[in-house]
Amino acid sequence: MRWVNRQVRRGEGILLGALPILLLVLLYLFFAAQRHAINPADKILPLPGAMAQALSSLLFVPDQLSGKLLFWADTGASLYRLGIGLGIATLTALVVGLILGVLPTVRATFSPLVTGIAVIPPIALLPILFIALGLGETAKIALIVIGITPVMVRDIMAHVAALPREQIVKAQTLGANSWQIIIRVALPQAMPRLLHAMRLALGPAWVFLISAEAIASDVGLGYRIFLVRRYLSMDVIIPYVAWIALLAIIMDVALLALSRRMFCWAHEAGR
């Protein structure tokens, strides 16, 4: 049997997916043990025991100044900012993408503007946002929204514009106006694509969030990482990075499960 024709069962897929991660962990442990054999005080590649000890103080010991458990305070602040930003971006992308996708005149008018905004590096706008909106939550959330909304709009717009023309014609034959076509024809078919666009936007959204927190914040996962880097506290940085990755994976899996449950017709059989 050719490899291109071999199908992977669910159990095999989980095992195969775990192998590269396990290999990376083993490689890290090998090099960390090598460095500590030469220098027991090495801070670049901390051993698991050192990371567990450093993380436990953030998990279970209240901060002397704020009285909060810093790990959970950082996680809550970051997830709040990410959730608000992603929610605003998703709603905006859905509305604007549907209108641009269904109405050719509106698409021809505003599509170049959306494209122009999408190619601007959002990080370059961060100083402008801090000057205009201050150093509070608004600027951080705005960076996430500005960073991911144009790309999501373009994705939804292209998907809706590519819908079979026959569907539009049949809807008009049955008496549907432009608004009804948007709601009853385009919207149901755009929803699975919207969840897919959210999954693709998760990575950039985390990048913009961490960038904003690193520059101006007093709580958050990005803030903590850049705060302890001056002390070379890799025993804190590595667990925080791993935690961010785990949160992103959980969100991605949740969105995929939601899409498959609500829009099973949009997914190929067996996937």
Image: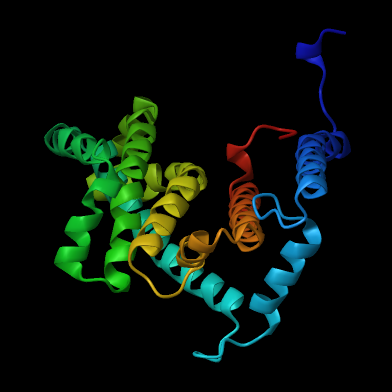
User: Is residue 176 visible from the viewing direction of this image?
Assistant: no
Q: From the viewer's perspective, tell me whether residue 158 is left or right of residue 233.
A: left
Residue at image location 62% in from the left, 48% down from the top: 256
**Quarter of the image where the N terminus is located:** top right
Q: How many marks can you see?
A: 0
User: Is residue 260 visible from the viewing direction of this image?
Assistant: yes
What is the x, y in percent for residue 27?
A: 78, 38
Residue at image location 72% in from the left, 57% down from the top: 41
Q: Nearer the viewer, residue 36 or 17?
A: 36
Residue 142 to residue 196: above or below: below
Residue at image location 65% in from the left, 54% down from the top: 242
What is the x, y in percent for residue 173?
A: 30, 35
Residue at image location 70% in from the left, 82% down from the top: 60
State the scheme by which the image is colored. rainbow
Image-quadrant location for residue 26 = top right
Q: From the viewer's perspective, tell me whether residue 148 is left or right of residue 134.
A: right
Q: From the viewer's perspective, tell me whether residue 244 is left or right of residue 134.
A: right
What is the x, y in percent for residue 141?
A: 33, 64
In this view, which residue lies farthest toward the front?
A: 38
**Quarter of the image where the C terminus is located:** top right
What is the x, y in percent for residue 268?
A: 66, 32
Q: Nearer the viewer, residue 81 or 129?
A: 129
Residue 110 to residue 54: above or below: above
Residue 18 to residue 85: above or below: above
